[in-house]
Every structure is written in C-alpha cells, then in structure tokens.
C-alpha cells in the first residue's frame, strides 16, 4: 500500500522526473537519502517502471491529430486489433470501447494528407468494416499518463 508520502513523491516525479531527491525531499519533508530509499522501493515494487521525457509532438512535426472510431467485422479479437495497430507509428493509443465502435484510435500525423493516408491504411485492415474520424482542432487539456495522486 502506498502512503501519503509515497504519493507525494510520485506527484513530484510526475511533474519532473529529473527532479533531485533533495528537491523532492524539500517538498515532501524528507531528506534526500530518505526520498531515494522510497523511490528505490517504488521501483522494486513495480510502481515506477521507468523515467522518461515528455516531448511536444507538434514541435517534432506531428501537428495534426485525430480520434478514429474503428468498426470491425463480427467478433474481431482485441489481440487482432492490437497486432495491427502496433504496426502504425502514427497511432498514439488504441483501445477497445463500449458503444457502437469497436475501438478508438488516437492518431498523430504530419498534416491532413498524412492523416488521410493513415486512416485509409487502417480502413484497409481485413477486420475493419468502416472508420469514422474526428480531427482535433485545439487540445484543451493534456495530462501525463497518470493523474496526480494528491490534491
């Protein structure tokens, strides 16, 4: 079980994975060595599975994005969808969903022409009956993968 201090440490790492143990300790009222011990325990337990950097996709030339609803034939297995979608570098996330669509795919592309080509490739997958795309105009809220754990 995670206590409030572990959650506070995770919040700080979520804001800046490069933060020093001393800086985190100043926020959570622990010494740098105590923060390091807790982080090491969180790593050993698998609560933290790595450290990364967040990039701005638009700054790297991936300025166009869309959410694509995918409608599949019969009883298409999630593994079949996953195997296909993993081949697309443009697919950021893909999930099975409840409702009319079978899957929802978040796509990033260089421009609308590139997006159109990706959606055409998705639609050509043997298990896909049709797709429906919604282009993102203005991202309003962007959060890291995990919401903050404290208020």
Image (cartoon, grey):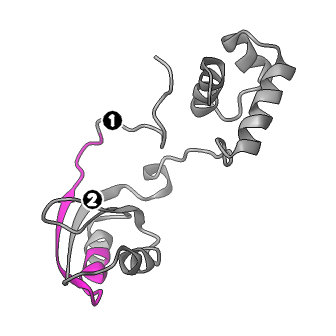
User: Which residue was labeled with disc 1?
Assistant: 141
User: Which residue was labeled with disc 2?
Assistant: 66
Q: Nearer the viewer, residue 82 or 67?
A: 82
Q: Nearer the viewer, residue 101 or 55?
A: 101
User: Which residue is rendered at x = 45% and y = 33% of the image?
Assistant: 147
1 or 2: tag closer to the N-terminus: 2
Give the answer, above or below, for where 13 lies relative to 119.
above
Give the answer, above or below, for where 112 lies relative to 72.
above
| Crowd tier of the residue under label 2, counting other residues whose Cα lies within 10 Å: few below 14, some 14–19, many 20 or above | some
User: Does residue 15 appear left or right of residue 88 in this picture?
Assistant: right
Secondary element at image label 1: loop
- Quadrant in the rendering for residue 24: top right
User: Does residue 86 appear left or right of residue 7 in this picture?
Assistant: left
Q: Position of residue 140 (x, y in %)?
A: 28, 36
User: Which residue is rendered at x = 49% and y = 28% of the image?
Assistant: 148
Q: Is residue 138 magenta?
A: yes
Instruction: Give the magenta range.
Output: 118-139
Q: Position of residue 55 (x, y in %)?
A: 54, 47
Give the answer, above or below, for where 137 lies relative to 77.
above
* Residue farthest along the front direction in this orientation: 1
Secondary element at image label 2: strand
User: Which residue is rendered at x = 33% and y = 78% of the image?
Assistant: 77
């Amino acid at each position: 079980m995670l206590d409030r201090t572990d959650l506070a440490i995770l919040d700080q790492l979520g804001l800046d994975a490069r933060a020093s143990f001393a800086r985190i300790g100043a926020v959570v009222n622990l010494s740098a060595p105590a923060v390091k011990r807790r982080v090491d325990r969180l790593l050993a337990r698998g609560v933290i599975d790595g450290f990364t950097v967040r990039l701005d996709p638009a700054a790297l030339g991936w300025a166009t994005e869309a959410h694509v609803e995918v409608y599949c034939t019969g009883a298409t297995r999630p593994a079949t969808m996953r195997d296909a979608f993993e081949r697309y570098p443009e697919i950021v996330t893909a999930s099975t969903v409840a409702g009319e669509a079978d899957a929802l795919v978040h796509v990033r592309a260089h421009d609308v022409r590139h997006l159109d080509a990706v959606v055409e490739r998705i639609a050509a997958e043997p298990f896909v009956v049709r797709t429906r795309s919604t282009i993102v105009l203005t991202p309003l809220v962007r959060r890291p993968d995990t919401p903050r754990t404290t208020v």
